[in-house]
Image (tube, rainbow, N blue to C red):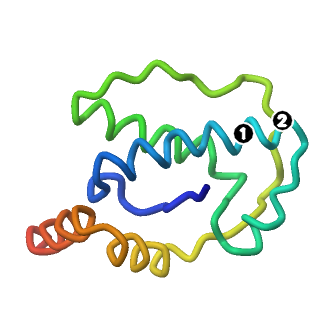
Amino acid sequence: MRMWMADPKIMCRNHLLGEHAEIHMFIGAINRRQSMNGYLKKGFLEVHNLCGRHEELVKEMKRRGYEHCSVLEENWISAQESGCIDRQRSLRELVRRCSRCRQNYAHARNRSP
């Protein structure tokens, strides 16, 4: 599980929907009081950004015409600022791993002024 924190517009369908599902899994794990230390230490999780990131992903899902019907648990245990993702490093890893995300990223860069 991880949060990519890359621009959702460059993410392929699998990574977009995958990160969305993983946000729900993170919140479930936090509610069960499971340790997130490994994810935090590896820079895969920003607890304080789970809700905001969920909204970013949902916005992109809707823009693409995907249905969204999974709401975040209302009573999840919120945390103070916790975790930090190196966004540039994460983006490099995403485009290294996924040819479709790499193509989307290259296309977005070519369109930027």
Q: Position of residue 65 (x, y in %)?
A: 22, 28
Q: Quadrant of the C terminus?
A: bottom left
Reading the image, the residue beneath label 1 is 27
Residue at 72 percent of width and 23 percent of height: 74
Residue 17's place in the image compared with 40, above or below, is above
- Between residue 47 and residue 112, name the one nearer to us: 47
Q: Residues within 10 Å of mark 2 (few under 14, many from 20)?
A: some
Q: Identify the mark at residue 31; answer none if there is no mark.
A: 2
Residue at 27 percent of width and 63 percent of height: 101
Please name the amino acid that badge 1 sits on. Ile
- Between residue 86 and residue 26, name the one nearer to us: 26
Image-based side of 88 in relation to 113, left or right: right
- The answer to whether the residues at label 1 and label 2 have Cβ atoms under 8 Å apart is yes
Residue at 24 percent of width and 71 percent of height: 102
Image-based side of 30 in relation to 14, left or right: right
Q: Identify the mark at residue 96; answer none if there is no mark.
A: none
Please name the amino acid that badge 2 sits on. Asn
Q: Position of residue 67 (x, y in %)?
A: 34, 22
Q: Quadrant of the N terminus?
A: bottom right
Q: Position of residue 66 (x, y in %)?
A: 29, 28
Residue 57's place in the image compared with 9, above or below, is above
- All told, the count of numbered labels is 2
Give the SS element for disc 2.
helix
Q: Position of residue 34 (x, y in %)?
A: 87, 47
Residue 97's place in the image compared with 2, above or below, is below
Q: Residues within 10 Å of mark 1 (few under 14, many from 20)?
A: many
Question: Real-space Cα distance between discs 1 and 2?
Answer: 6 Å
Residue 54's place in the image compared with 98, above or below, is above
